[in-house]
Image: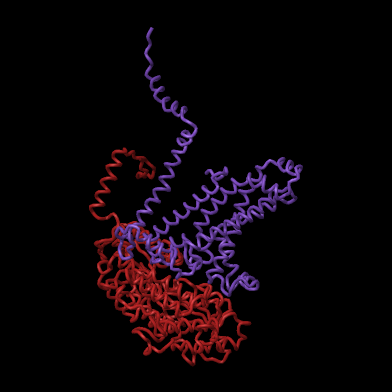
Chain colours: A red, B purple
Amino acid sequence: MVNNNKNQSGKHYSVGVSRRRFLAATGATGIALGVAGCSGGGGEVDIDPTADIEGDVTVELSMDQDFADIQSGIQQALYDNGLNDNISIDILPGDFETGSRQTAFTQALDAGRSSPDVFMMDSGWTIPFIVREQLINLENGLTQETLDFVKNNYLETAVATASNPRSGDLYGVPLFPDYPVMQYRKDLVEEAGYSPEENNWSTEPMSWLEFAETVADVWDFHGGQSSFNYGFTTQAANYAGTACCTFNEMMTSFGGAYFGNHENLFGPVGERPVTVNEQPVTDTIRVMRSFMRGPDANNAHPDYPQISTSDLVEFTEEPARQPFTNGQALFHRNWPYAVNINLNEFGEDFGTMPLPFGVPESEGQYEGTGGTAAALGGWHLTINPNSNNLNAAAQTVAAFANEDVMLSLFALGGYLPPAPSVTEQATTEEVGMIANHLDTLSVAGQSTVPRPVTPVWPDQSPLISSEVHDAYTGAKSPSSALSSLQEDLEGTEQI
Amino acid sequence: MASETPPNESGTRLLMRPLNRLEMLSEQAYAYVLLLPAAILLGAIAFYPLVRTLTFSLRADDVFGADPFGKFVGFDNYIELLSGQALIPNQFVDPAMNEPLLRQALIVTLLFAVLSVFFETLIGFGQALILNQDFRGRRWVRVAIIIPWAVPVVIQAMIFWLMFNPTIGWGTDFMQWLGVFGDNPLANTSNSFIIVLVADIWKTSAFMALLILAGLQSVDRSLYDVARVSGASPWQQFKLITMPIVLPALLVAMLFRTMDAMRIYGVIDASTGCEQVPTLTCLVISSFNARRWASASAVAFLTAIVIGIMVLFYIWQFRRTEGGAI
C-alpha cells in the first residue's frame, strides 16, 4: 500500500506501508471507533456554538442548483451579518426532486458519512429524521439568543415541522417556507367586469363557490374553452403533492382532516383518529369533480360549475403552471416560485389572492380546519451529527437566522423569509416586483396547514394520493375510495 | 552411474503435476474447471448480495429507529406480501382481489413480460426476415429498424410521455378517435399499461431482430434451393429449415428479453410513473424510499425467485433444442 502526499516543495513523494502495519493500523482504528461508538448513528455530540474557529474551515451544505448559483451572494450576506471570516461555505447542488434528495440523505445518515455538514431538508420529511435521532439537537447546538429568535419570530407551523413532536426540541432552522396562493390574469378579470382591487381580492379570501362562479363567468366572457383551454389549473395528479398539499389544503378549507384536530398532525401515531371517511372530505372530492367534469357528472357537486378539464388529474406543478404562463388559463394555484415567473410574463396584468375557503373557519368540523388554508411547504437547515466541522456548521446555520440574510435570500432567489415580519416589511427596492404581492403572501402565511408528518407519513402519502386520484378520475366513487383509504390509514397507524 | 535430479528440475516437475492432471481430466470435468473462476466471481458479485437481501428480508421494518431493520421476524414479510397485507404503496399480489389486477405488482409484471416478449418476438422476427433479403436500400432499412434500440431509455419514455401529454401531445386525441383510450391515458392504469407496453415493443423489437438476423444469416442458402427443387412451399421452408436453425438464437433472445421485462422500471418511471404501472421493481424502489428496507428486500428476493422460475421454465421447456441446453 502506498500513500501519495506532497512535501513542502509541492512534489509528490511516496511512503511505503507494510501489509502488517496496514492491518494493525486499520484494526486498531476499527476497535477505537467501536469503543467510541462512532461507527454510525448520531448520539450525544458536544457543540460549542460560540467556539473560536481557528484556521480556514469549509462547511458543506447540500442544497440545490438554484442555491449553488447564488453561493457568492449568500456567502457575502452571511459575512456581512457576522459569520466568522474563517468559515467559508460550499453549496453542493443536490437532486432537485424532493424524493430523490430524501433518499440520498437517508443513505448518507444511515451510512454515517461526514459530508455534507449541513442538509437542506424538506419540511415534509424532516420529522422522521428527527424522531430517529439522526440529526443534531439544536437546543445544544445554537445559542439561547438564536433559539429564542427562531422560536419567537419564525412561522409557527414551519418551526413545528423542524422540531421533535414529543419533546419540542428544535432540530432544524427553517430556511424558507412555501405556501401557495391563487394567481390570476387581472387584465382579463377586469375586462369581464370584476374589480379585484375594490373587492380586496388580494387579502380577503372568497369561498370556493364564489370563486368557481367567478372563474366560470370570466372564462365564459372570454369565449370559454375555444379561447382559453382552462379557466383554472391546479395540481391533482397521483403524486405526493396531492396528499401533502392541494388535497390537504382544500379538504382543510372544507372543515375536514386526515387525523381529526390539528393537534394530532404530528402524532402520536396509533393514538389519533383517522377521519377521512367523512362528509367534508367527500365534499372536497365532489367539488373537484365538478371543476373538472361539470355539475352533472357522476359524483360531482351540483352547486359548483365546471371551470377546468379532466387534464388536472395529470397536472403536477409545472404542467399546471405552463398553460397559465402561456396564456391558456385564467386562474392558477401554485407556490411563490410561480409568482416570480408569471410576474415576469404579465407584470401589472397579474394578480394574486389567498386560496378560497370551503366553509367559514367557525364551521370547520375539527380544530384548525375551515377558512382559507394554504399547504405548508418549505425547507430547513439541519446538521449532520457525523460532520467533522460541527462547531462551524452550527455557526453557519445560526448565521442564516438573521433578518438581513433572509432579505438577501428573498432578493437573490425569491425565497420567502421564514419570519413573517420580515416578509411584511420587504420593499420593492429590496426584493423586486413580488413586493406588490406580499399582502397576499402574508395572509397565506397566516393560514398554513402542514402535512401530517410522522415516521409513517411516507407510507400514508401514496395511499392518500392514490385513493383520492381514483376518486378524481372516477375509477372509484368518493365513498368507495374514502372507505378504502380509511381502512388503509388505520392499518398504517397500527405499527 | 547414478545421477541426482537438479533442484530446479524437481520444482518444475512439482509445477507440472497439476497441469498434467488437468490434461488427464475428462472433457466435462475440464469444462467445470474452466468455469470455476467465473463461478467464484459470480458468487461474489451476484450470490452474496442475494444472500444478504434474503437475510435483510427476514427482519422487520423499523420506520422509527435509526437502524431501518428491526427484529428477526422469519418469513412474516413474505407471508404479508403473498397475502396482500403488506404495508407498502402497492400490493405484491392480492389473493382476495380487493385490488384491481393492474394494481398488483406481480400480475402487472408477468402480464407485461408475456405480452412484450410475445410482440417483440413476432415483430423482431418479421424485421429480421425483411433484413435478411437482398434488396436495394437494405442498409437504410436496417438503420431505421435499429434506431429505436439506440435511443436512451429516458428519451424513449419522454417521447411517449410527450405524445400523450394533455397540453401538447396528439396521441390522446388520436387514440380517443380510435375509441381505445379515455380522456387522460397517463392517469389511467390500463391505458398507461398499454403506453408502456407499446413504448417497450417499439424500442426492443430491434434487439430481437438483430439476434434473430444473426441466426438467419447462419442458414445455408443452398438448403432453400434444395427445398424449392423438392417442391416445398414457403411455409414449409420456414417451418422445416429456417425455424429449427434460428430457434437456438431465438430462445436466447427471448430469455434475455424476458429477464429484462421482469425488471422493467426506467421507461415507466420517466413516462407514466410507478403509480399507474406498479411493477415489481417499482415496488422495490417505492418500499425502499418509504424506508421499508426489509419489505423492499423481500420484494426483491421474490422478484429474483420469479425470474429464476421463468428461466428454469425456458431451460426445461426447450431442453432438447441446442439453445435450450444453456
Q: Position of residue B10 (x, y in %)?
A: 38, 20
The answer to whether A33 is drawn above or below residue A92 in the figure is: above
Left or right: where B217 falls relative to B191:
right
| Residue placed furthest toward the left | A35
Would residue A113 be seen by someone viewing this image from the given angle? no
The answer to whether A18 is drawn above or below residue B143 in the figure is: above
Quadrant assignment for the N terminus of chain B: top left
Nearer-the-camera pick, B309 or B16: B309
Q: Quadrant of residue A358?
A: bottom left
Q: Position of residue A438 (x, y in %)?
A: 43, 82
Q: Image point 62% across, 86% down: which residue?
A: A223
Would residue B186 be seen by someone viewing this image from the given angle? yes
Left or right: where A63 falls relative to B320:
left
The answer to whether A319 is drawn above or below residue A383 in the figure is: below
Q: Position of residue B116 (x, y in %)?
A: 57, 58
Q: Position of residue A108 (x, y in %)?
A: 36, 59
Q: How many marks?
A: 0
Q: Image point 45% across, 84% down: which residue?
A: A283
Nearer-the-camera pick, B271 or B240: B240
Nearer-the-camera pick, A21 or B160: B160
